[in-house]
Amino acid sequence: MLKYAILGFLRYRPMTGYDIEQWMETSTGHFWHAKISQIYATLKQVEADGLVRSHIEPQEGRPDRRVYTLTDGGEAALTAWLAAPIVEPEMKKDTLLLKVFFGLPLGKDALLTQLRLQLELHKLQKQEYETQTPQEMARFLADQPELAADALMWELTRRFGESYEDTYIQWLQEAIQVIEDQLA
Amino acid sequence: MLKYAILGFLRYRPMTGYDIEQWMETSTGHFWHAKISQIYATLKQVEADGLVRSHIEPQEGRPDRRVYTLTDGGEAALTAWLAAPIVEPEMKKDTLLLKVFFGLPLGKDALLTQLRLQLELHKLQKQEYETQTPQEMARFLADQPELAADALMWELTRRFGESYEDTYIQWLQEAIQVIEDQLA
DNA sequence: TCGCTCATGTAATGGGTTACATGATTCA
DNA sequence: TGAATCATGTAACCCATTACATGAGCGA
């Protein structure tokens, strides 16, 4: 899957592994991420599969860049993947929910501490979606104005993040209430 | 992490790996799941760590059961984990959001097909939270009435699932609207 | 008779994280 | 002077999925 995220970024323009990691961190980061080491490894793979091509750009004073370009085969693979329907719901994992589910023996106070901490963190996260993320998008667009149409899609995913955090915050507040009221 | 889910279930009562999988599927399944093969492997590990103990219960006509019991060390490890604050936000992955983010070259119609399919699936998922899940919880409680207090926690996680699906559905409807209106 | 449930496991493979290794430039 | 940025990669390890293997009983 990371494979396709990489192809997606390379459709915008040729990039290095390092560049891809930067983009990912500030754009898809909240719903798709990868460590730099994995990106390098995956780039090697997709090059072996003929989906990308690379060449070295020498630099002075800093390490040479290996720049990857999307091939026609790569573009086709990307579109095919995009079009493939997602049939089965994705199984997510959420540590907090697991801790709540099994949390009774922890007792009221420790539970509330945990939940209140999460509430703070999710409020911060929401703020990031509201202020930070639009700024990043603007920066990308300033760099490559030809991606204006793509920015509409980016904005949709940003809004998802915002709504998700709203829901999480609301649920945490409700859970805190319930535990305050109904736990001894 | 699966490790602690397993300890959590064993706190309810001694169980086999098979039992744990059944519980997981119908209770934590939406925020924590595992394949049976991984459960068996992890049980072996936690036994080696002294967190659980096992004995064989012979059966006739069907395979013998290896029943696991939580040790004192296991209970302590579980509580310690529950109490440990979750400091960094969990990085989730969502294939649909990735496809939306890079989805522009797919074109209006294919995008809408994908989103409408997801809308159907998430509506089904919501229904499951509303009707199926409460029934499963009732079944567990009927079996072990002493877990009534825990059921309050279970219900909180069920409500999260419900809200999450509501949000997802709303977002999908909004996204469909935006794409219908603003894409050529 | 065919497939499902009960019940346990191993082996191979894939996906992802952490740690290691290198090295110049720039900014506080 | 010390940390961050730019830039690339490998190796070991852990977590998770898929495939394989076994076998009785039960219901359609």
Image: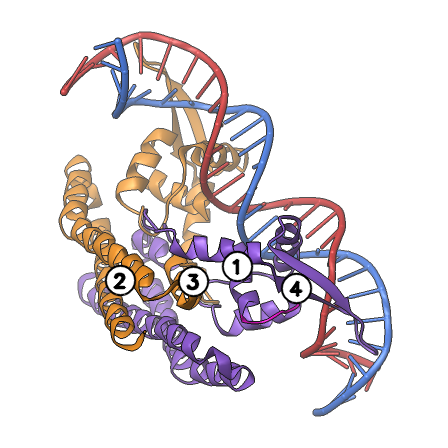
Chain colours: A orange, B purple, C red, D blue
In this rendering, the label closer to the viewer, 1 or 4? 1
* Quarter of the image where the C terminus of chain A is located: bottom left
Tell me: residue A36, above or below residue B56. Answer: above
**Residue identified by numbered label 1:** B75
Q: How far apart are marks 4 and 3 (CA)?
A: 20 Å
- Magenta residues, as a range? B12-17
**Residue identified by numbered label 4:** B68
Question: Are discs 2 and 3 located on one and the same chain?
Answer: yes
Instruction: Give amino acid for label 1.
Output: Glu
In this rendering, the label closer to the viewer, 2 or 1? 1
Please report contact status of discs 3 and 1: CB closer than 8 Å, yes or no. Answer: no
**Residue identified by numbered label 2:** A164
Q: Where is residue B61 in the image (x, y as percent from the top left)?
A: 83, 78
Query: Residue A84 falls in which quadrant of the image?
Result: bottom left
Instruction: Find numbered disc 3 in the image and state the secondary structure of the residue it sits on.
Output: helix
Tell me: residue A29, above or below residue B63. Answer: above
Instruction: Give amino acid for label 4.
Output: Tyr
Question: Are discs 4 and 3 located on one and the same chain?
Answer: no
Q: Where is residue A39 in the image (x, y as percent from the top left)?
A: 43, 35
**Residue identified by numbered label 3:** A98
Image position of B16 (left or right of A20): right
Instruction: Find numbered disc 1 in the image and state the secondary structure of the residue it sits on.
Output: helix
Residue A136: say if magenta.
no
In this figure, what is the number of numbered marks? 4
Instruction: Find numbered disc 2 in the image and state the secondary structure of the residue it sits on.
Output: helix
Between residues D27 and A7, which one lies in front from this camera angle? D27
Residue at (16% x, 38% y) in the render: A139
Circle 2 residues within 10 Å: few <14, some 14–19, many ≥20: some
Residue at (47% x, 81% y) in the render: B137
Please report contact status of discs 2 and 1: CB closer than 8 Å, yes or no. Answer: no
Between residues D24 and B113, which one lies in front from this camera angle? D24
Whether residue B113 appears in this view of the structure is yes
